[in-house]
Image (cartoon, rainbow, N blue to C red):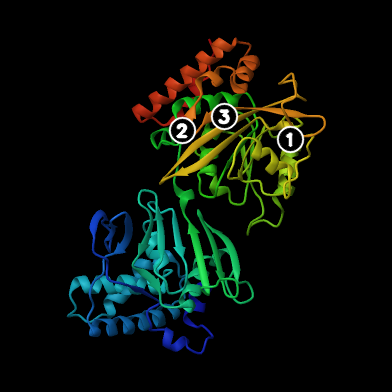
Amino acid sequence: MSYGLLKYVLNRNHAAEERRSDPGFHISDAEKGETVEEIQTDIRRRIIKHGNQFSYNIDFLQLTPAQREAMSIVKAKVVDSLSDSSEQIDMGLMGKARELARSILPQGMDQRSSSYISYIVAHDTVGYGPISILLEDKERIEEIEINSPTAQICIFHPSYGRCVTNLRFAGEYYFRNAVNKFIEDTDKELNDTTPIIDAQVGDARVHAQTKPYAASSAVATIRLGGRKDIDVCKLCSGGTASSEMLAYLWLAMESGLNIVIAGAPASGKTTFLTSILAFAKRYRRIIVIEEDVNEFKFYHNAINMVPLYGTNSKSSVSTREQARNALRMRPEIMVIGEIRGDEAKELFGAANTGIQFLTTMHSNETGQAIIKRLLTKPMEVDDRLISQLDMSVYMREDGLSRKVSNISEYRWLSRAEILEPEQNINDSDSVGISSIVENCTLNRQALRGSKAVLSFAKSHGISDKQAMKELDRRRAFLEGLCSEGLQPLQAIEGIYSYE
């Protein structure tokens, strides 16, 4: 039997005996409105439209007082039965819990009521309450947001945005219990000693707080976006970037340019970084450092990729230490999922030795603001190394979609990329910044003389005009992949030939 269920059943709280039968969460009546989407599962879910607002509802079955009393009795008996079991209790036994609950219910109860009650009891005992109900739709939900222990839970849906559900916990006790069961395998626990926790559970990232830090007594956010595989074709079809932008970035990647992807939280930075890693040649040695390596879907055909953990529940070393360790592994490309502090110094130091890098950072501006952000606390990159930055990609949310808003190239006096000082960075260096993409629109004229195109031409011994033809060829190649529904990562290697 798992520790999580044992704590649930034999909680030392004096009210544990009462809670044994009390429902841990409530399902309110579904709101009325226009049904936009219906998902057929054991208990139907609906997206309901109310003007410009949407709600996400679990189909509610109206129970009589006698049926509610039966549900409390069944829950207590299921808890007792499972607590006596010597088997390991986990989500795989959800079906067993449902069958057990169904067998305890009165024989005369109609099938729909029996199915509904057993479903709720199973999630309330073996599962994580309303969290596990919502996790049944994890492929369609980006985040689960709990703003207080008794408030209606919200979800963020990729098509309909933030939706209020008709699910809520019965109180803080049940909230804490569900969260702690969910993060059980991380060796963390949300309690009075540790009122703030960050945890990674599979592909889900969990952040939770309780009093005294949470004014509502308890809050939690569970991010599920990492589960969705996004490739370059989906970036095109979803409007994140055009095929020409991606072809340009393909040349930049192959030319060894160092790229920072910036934007606000949840603007699609990591997803975009993961996708363009497909443009790296498969034989290049790529060292990836991330708090959770599940952030990076290794679905592309790199045969020499090494994932490393930075600071997280599975690692006691810092991201900066892992960046130093990566240098001992002969990387050709270093990828840090996000730079926040002094790991940025190691990244730019590595770039100074000729190692290409890709990373993300939080920023609400692009261009010159990226440089200022890197030079100041907490990152404080050495101003003699800042010239290793070649390009920044700025992501922003546009309604319910993520878009590449701006791409800036940096040319440095110290690297003889410009002849006269432009914007001074320090006493010995200055930078020229050109916008290749501005307000989601690619500047074709700026593209012709871009650093990526010129570097590509130089590295392959071809003219600038031939490099532009190669860019157009790759743009057409990507468009063909998208239109034919092919798997890009199985086909990209075939594009490497230069005429």
Q: Is residue 326 visible?
A: no
**Label 2 – label 3 distance at C-alpha:** 23 Å
Tell me if 344 is positioned left or right of 477 in this view: right
User: Which quadrant would residue 477 be assigned to in this image?
Assistant: top left
Q: Do callouts 1 and 2 mark residues in contact (Cβ within 8 Å)?
A: no
Name the element at disc 3. Answer: loop
Circles 2 and 3, Cβ within 8 Å, touching? The answer is no
Picture layout, residue 120 above or below residue 269: below
**What residue is shown with label 3?**
282
Secondary structure category for the residue under label 1? helix
Give, as a three-letter code, the residue at label 1. Ile
**Total number of numbered discs in the rendering:** 3
Q: Amino acid at mark 3?
A: Arg
> With 413 as the anchor, is 228 left or right in this view?
left
The location of residue 447, given as percent across then percent down, is 55, 21
Q: Residue 188: horizontal and vertical position, in percent?
A: 60, 67
Pick the residue in front: 201 or 438. Answer: 438
Which residue is at a point 46% across and 33% down the rendered structure image?
Answer: 241
Q: Is residue 105 left or right of residue 372?
A: left
Q: CA distance from mark 3 to mark 1?
A: 28 Å
Q: CA distance from mark 1 to mark 2?
A: 27 Å
Q: Nearer the viewer, residue 76 or 366?
A: 366
Residue that label 2 marks: 241
